Amino acid sequence: FDCGELPASFTPNPPGLFQAGHRYLLMTAAAVWSISGISWTALNLLGPIFVGTTAACVYLLARVGMGRLLALSIAALWMSSPLQFMQLPHLRDVAKAPFFMFTLCAIAWIVLTRRSRRQTVAALALIGAVLGFGFGFRTDVASYLPLVVLAVLVFRPGFVRADLLTRGIAAVAAVGAYL
């Protein structure tokens, strides 16, 4: 397909609700096509990238409670699961998995570590930004943000009255960066 083949009278429509909700996924496909040329098979590169990113997050999450070798084995089993191979052609579905696993890793970090106010706020801003980016791939990634905010407000270790300000600022930073 060459854009020069379009008739001169062609006028594109603005993205519909469905397309607008997947803008970054569509832009990622467009980036692949700008390099490889427009073909459905060229998009076969994206599924493994999403699965590999998700597997890295599975590894990180497994490392919370086990050694390297066992965590690597868990990630390898997850990545080689027949269910994962069945999802590879469904880019819209496989695109949200990295953001879901990232959210689980973020929540584990929030719940298991206690950092300074500056580090906590910076980390929550980064988490919010990643989830905001994920929203461009799948709008249901928005449902992950309340879990992160709840984790920092309620489950951050060492609950003391003086820490309420840090928790609040971090939650606001996550939401602000998401937006």
Image: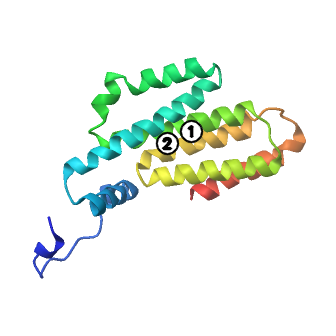
Report the residue at 51% width, 34% height from top: 56
> Looking at the picture, how far across and down is residue 25, in whole percent?
36, 53
How far apart are labels 2 and 1 at the CA level?
A: 6 Å
> Looking at the picture, how far across and down is residue 176, in whole percent?
63, 58
> Looking at the picture, how far across and down is residue 22, in whole percent?
36, 54
Give the residue pinned by disc 1: 103
Task: Please tell me whether residue 113 is drawn above or below residue 41 in the rendered image.
Answer: above
The numbered mark at residue 138 is none
Q: Quadrant of the N terminus?
A: bottom left
Dot 2: what SS? helix
- Residue 167 placement, left or right of 33: right
Report the residue at 20% width, 50% height from top: 40
* Label total for image: 2
Report the residue at 68% width, 35% height from top: 109
Residue type at tag 2: Phe
Give the residue pinned by disc 2: 99
- Residue 160 placement, left or right of 157: right
Residue type at tag 1: Thr
- Front position in the image: 144 or 109: 109
